[in-house]
Image: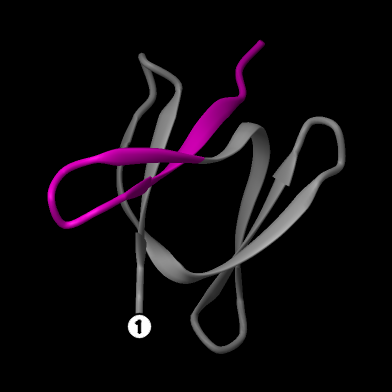
Amino acid sequence: MCEADAYLLHEDGKEELYLAEVDVIEPCPGGQLRLISVYGEQKFLAGRIKNMSLLQHKVFLEVIS
């Protein structure tokens, strides 16, 4: 499979799993991201993509407050 796991990246460098097996990440109005897993689970986050490691299948997200 080619999906990735999405993690919240905290200021101290700690990674927290936000959504596993993400298939789609799309921008929404107001600076939100919509994440959809391969199982159809959806989550919305006011944040941005900090970085990605495609070889490790990880997407790191940063919360915007």
- Residue 30 lies, with reference to residue 16, above or below; the image says below
Q: In terms of image quadrants, where is residue 40?
A: top right
Image coords of residue 12 (percent x, y)? 13, 50
Q: Residues within 10 Å of mark 1 (few under 14, many from 20)?
A: few
Q: Quadrant of the C terminus?
A: bottom left
Q: Residue furthest left?
A: 12
**For this view, does 43 lie left or right of residue 7?**
right
- Residue 60 lies, with reference to residue 62, above or below; the image says above
Count of numbered marks:
1
- Residue 61 lies, with reference to residue 18, above or below; the image says below
**Residue at horizontal 69%, vertical 58%?**
43
Q: In terms of image quadrants, where is residue 19?
A: top right
Q: Residue furthest right?
A: 40
**For this view, does 61 lie left or right of residue 33?**
left
Image coords of residue 30 (percent x, y)? 55, 89
Question: What sort of colour scheme is used for the picture?
Answer: one colour
Q: Residue furthest top?
A: 1
For the record, the magenta segment spans 1-17
Is residue 51 within the magenta segment? no
**Residue at horizontal 45%, vertical 21%?**
57
Image coords of residue 24 (percent x, y)? 67, 45
**Residue at horizontal 77%, vertical 53%?**
42
Is residue 10 within the magenta segment? yes
**For this view, does 8 lie left or right of residue 3?**
left
Amino acid type, callout 1: Ser
Q: Quadrant of the N terminus?
A: top right
Circle 1: element type? loop
Q: Which residue is mark 1?
A: 65
Image coords of residue 17 (percent x, y)? 48, 37
